[in-house]
Image (tube, rainbow, N blue to C red):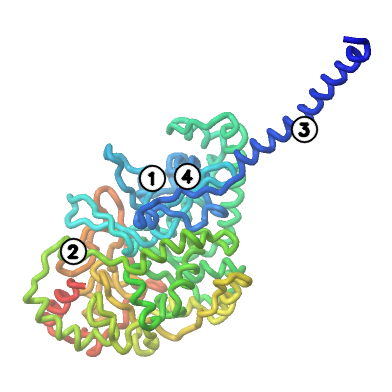
Amino acid sequence: MNENDTAKSPWKRRFIILFIVTIVLPLLAVIWLVQRFGGDVPVDHASPTEHFKYGSTGGEHEMGFPYWIWRVLPDVCPQYLPGKGYQSLGMVFEKNADGSDRDLPVGTSQRRYQGIDRVFVNCAVCHTSTVRTAAAQPPTIVLGMPAATFNMKGFEEFFFHCAADPKFSKEFILPEIERQGGQLDLLDRYVVYPVAIAIMRDRVLALAGRFDWVARQHAWGPGRVDTFNSAKVIFNFPMAHLDPAEFDAPADFPSLWRQRQRKEPHEMQLHWDGNNTTVEERNKSAAFGTGTTPPTIDIERISRVEDWILDASPPSFSQFFPVDAELALRGAPIYKAYCANCHGASGSDFSGELVGKVTPLAEIGTDRRRLDSYSYTLAVNQATLYAGYPWRFTHFRKTHGYANMPLDGVWLRAPYLHNGSVPSLRELLEPAAARPASFYRGNDVYDPLKVGFVSDQPQGNGQPFFLFDTSAPGNGNGGHTGKAYGTELSADEKTALVEFMKTF
């Protein structure tokens, strides 16, 4: 080696070291960071029913809780729950092979986004529930039925209260994650989760401020939601200055079966007040309740749910309880005379002149709060949603009554009327004054005689139920009465009619 080569080699080494330090290492760091914090990967499920139960709508992007924060919050803030865990809010858990509960309830989905596993609710949280044939019997999970046990208002308020608690901090949450087996790596433990906890606290508290009107309302109880007052928050309505008649307007979660028959051969008026005639628009509107926004909605995965509910059907009453075939046969002509024109020929035949059409409030006479909560101004605002997207809303309209619903799986849709103010079909056939003035909601034990869930017990299996007061605003149990609605039939005729409706 000559003197020139000896002189150059240190500079060559220095150049290589400089290149590695200034170019290669930063590039590798960028690649690692992109791999670690990039990507958007939902947990997918091959089965359409598993997808319905646990598939994403896209809500995890904006509203998703980091997985381990979601898991441990019931143990960090147990004082804000009515009992043990999310089960106490009426959420449904399936069992693992060893008999333990799955880590996530039915109606929640998971997605890895921005380097962290996130969890939020999906469609099934409002459209899945359980049925028990007796208090000592195990529950049967039924997909597509109204979530009769799920307390959505309690669910929201749990997170709002917990976020305002001093324990919503890394000092309490991280040790609980470790106690429950969450093996966070060093980056997650010292950077990602502490930052996520701070961000989630601020975002939930900000959301609580926007939804403070909920706390001022009467309790909804399980199985109900004030749908369109919640929608007004999206459009920044001045909630404190709205007409008081628009508030306290909770309505029951609907069922999701046989959606194809609601759009073919003729489009029915959908939602309780018939404010839309397009199943797909209705579905995308409902997705806002699962945390989606126009930029984040997962159209591909919502389409899988839409495809499944087109032809999903309810389980039959006879799978759980016997039907008196002779008595049902006597009830068939009574149903045809009093019910078929508005509600369809049967649970699978939706033919009838007024099926899926709106009956004016002056005629039906049921509680008007849900109707009044959906204002003309809200309908105009909804037309701006998805502006610039191929699926922009164009079918929302203000109506002046309630839609006549088909009665597929009607036995699983108790309590009855749009606001769930009448506990059973048998009691719906009584004049309003003879219907229960109060009853308990949230029980999944079924009463096959009255056709509804057991409603005279304040608690069961250690779980307190919700006392529903029909005198509270929005809870009125009047209407759907008079000769035309069968409330003047004899007791024997009513019994036969109810038996026939068990076949739906």
Residue at 18% over, 64% down = 447
Q: Is residue 255 above or below residue 43?
A: below
User: Based on the displayed image, in which of its 4 quarters is residue 335 positioned?
Assistant: bottom left
Disc 3 from disc 1: Cα separation? 50 Å
Residue at 55% over, 72% down = 391
Disc 3 from disc 4: Cα separation? 40 Å
Q: Which mark, residue 70?
A: 4
Residue at 48% over, 52% down = 120
Query: In the image, is 301 to the left or to the right of 148?
Result: right
Crowd rating for badge 1 (residues with CA inside 10 Å; few <14, some 14–19, many 20+)? some
Q: Which mark, residue 23?
A: 3
| Residue 238 visible in this rendered orientation of the protein | no
Q: Earlier in the sequence, mark 3 or mark 1?
A: 3
Can you tell which of label 3 and label 1 is closer to the viewer?
3
Label 2 sits on what residue type? Answer: Asp
Q: Earlier in the sequence, mark 2 or mark 4?
A: 4
Crowd rating for badge 2 (residues with CA inside 10 Å; few <14, some 14–19, many 20+)? some
Q: Are marks 4 and 1 in contact (CB under 8 Å)?
A: no
The residue under label 1 is 85
Disc 3 from disc 2: Cα separation? 72 Å
The residue under label 2 is 447
- Front-most of residues 173 and 6: 6
Say what secondary structure mark 3 lies in: helix
Query: In the image, is 55 to the left or to the right of 415?
Result: right
- Front-most of residues 256 and 494: 256
Q: Earlier in the sequence, mark 4 or mark 1?
A: 4
Say what secondary structure mark 1 lies in: loop
Q: Estimate the x, y position of residue 26 in percent, counting from the top left.
A: 73, 33
Say what secondary structure mark 4 lies in: helix
